[in-house]
Amino acid sequence: MSAMSAWSRTTLCALTAVGTLTAVISAFWGFSRRARRLDVTSLLDLSRIVVVDSEAACNEVVEGLLGPERPAVVGLDCEWANSPSLRGNKSGGGKSGDVARTKVDLLQLATLDRAVLVRLRKMRGKFPKKLEEMIENKSILKVGVAVCEDAVRLQNDYGVRVGGCLDLRHIATRCRYSWWTGGGTVIERASGLQSLAATVLGVALEKSFRVRCSNWRAEFLTDKQVMYAANDAYVAVKIFERLMSWDNGRELWKDGIGAYETVIDVPFKYISKKLNKNKKGCKPLKPKASSYATRHSPLYDNCQLEAPNGILLCTCDRRKIDWYLKRSLAEIVCEDPPTARLNFEPSGVPDESRKYYLANKLNVYVVCGKDNSYLRKNVVPHEYRKYFPADMKNHRSHDVLLLCTDCHRLSDYHDGLLRQKLAADYRAPVSGSQAARQSRNPQLVRVRSAANALMQKKHRLPQQRKTNLESVLKDHYDVEEISEDLLKESASMDANKTLDEEYVSHGEMVIAAAKAQGKLKDFERMWRQHFLDTMHPQYLPAYWSVTHNQ
């Protein structure tokens, strides 16, 4: 009994200690959360917020918003009222049965020290001239979450074209800090302004439903409405500033668009549709097995090929060495590393510009440095390089690097944005009715599949399945019996149908235009610099260069 009593007392003390510790942690966490909320409400006080409801007042305030010493970046957001009376009214922007929105009532702009709230519905349909000039100026970045969608609303409602919009989620995707999301990108967890504020700034942004859905068309806005609206735009600028410091992007903060030019005025939904796999939350899309073909062997064998006098000509893979050996054009002079010496004089010896091909290369991912599998990345996409002249194609290996699957996905995403920009610049559509020379003919595909099944698996197919497949062929050719020749012809038929004999692909159009402008080398350099700017590789092979073969 005494032993049991001692055990009970010990257990009770332990439970009491755990309970006390839990209470302390809960109290600290609660205090921390309250402190962070208080911190947010003090981001901008009413003294640094200007509300304007006339064209003259707006022009005066906006003109002084961006002085000569201020960075050309503003936070932008919009508020509008939802009107149940406009259910099903398409002009109100809603679908049948929905609560439709009215025109944008409030436009919020913010810099790092103040905010301006423009009550557009108070101006009787007149959009302030100075305000229009500012938001149409593409050299002034407008940052926020879903800011491109807000730009569309302003254009639809007031006919102004907002330029220079940058969705913060594009930058957050690029920053990719593992301590945020366990190795994924920040966007997998922080998809809205509130989430980004918590992740990037460490603050809990209040998003009260009562304020968010309040009457933004009221005669006078309450202090809570003013603070809510101003901080939405202000927090966007603060997030932008913080992300820039994480991304080593101070050049952009000081000098303008810079490395993010490819995502200016590009809605973030381009990638979010791929990431939002289910309704429960944003989870990273797991690539299909066929999406990325990983190598089972290293990309670099680091074999060496020498001239007869022992001068190193290049490092290469084992297949190249075997090619020379099989034709008795070389002999092995060393096994580690495998080295073959030519028995004839080569046409030339490498000069200073070919150092890249002489150096050994590590089989590691160039971004994260891991080496658990081998996935190749074409820095200059194949759809463009295949139209390069022969002398530029010969240096293709320089632009084939190793990436992990996650980095490959992120790089492909950024490549897609640049591809969209090239499509607009060169009027070369990437997709759509003009972007496909051929289309699959479903009926011919069915006939060919049936013929292949009958040829390859005829003796293993159930009788009913065999009869059904034979019926497909008989119906298509309108015959009673299927000959062996007909079966072979069907199995090898072309199931494509030509849509446009004069079709020119996106890549061919872009390269033709760049060649006509004498800018093929610039085009190649652009893609290499794009890879550096978007992926920040830390483990590039020695002598890898943006200006290689230039």
Image: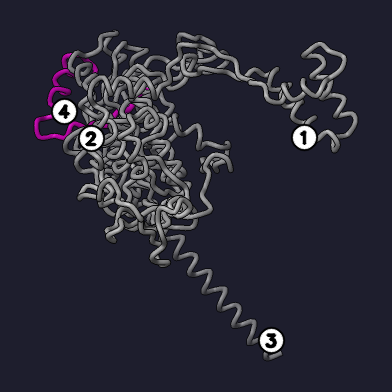
Task: Please provide the residue range marked out in magenta.
Answer: 53-79
Q: CA distance from mark 3 to mark 1?
A: 76 Å
Kindly identify which residue carries mark 1.
Answer: 456
Q: Are marks 1 and 4 in contact (CB under 8 Å)?
A: no
Q: Are marks 4 and 3 in contact (CB under 8 Å)?
A: no
Instruction: State which tag comes first along the sequence, 2 or 4.
Output: 4
Percent across and percent down for residue 531 are 33, 41
Kindly identify which residue carries mark 3.
Answer: 4
Horizontally, residue 319 falls left or right of residue 46, namely right
Q: Residues within 10 Å of mark 4 (few under 14, many from 20)?
A: some
Residue at the far bottom: name it.
2
Q: Quadrant of residue 9?
A: bottom right
| Marks 1, 2: nearer the viewer | 1
Horizontally, residue 529 falls left or right of residue 266, namely left
Q: CA distance from mark 1 to mark 4?
A: 74 Å
Instruction: State which tag comes first along the sequence, 1 or 4.
Output: 4
Q: CA distance from mark 3 to mark 2?
A: 72 Å
| Colour convention | one colour
For the C terminus, which image quadrant?
A: top left
Kindly identify which residue carries mark 2.
Answer: 258
Instruction: State which tag comes first along the sequence, 3 or 1.
Output: 3
| Marks 3, 2: nearer the viewer | 2
Kindly identify which residue carries mark 4.
Answer: 65
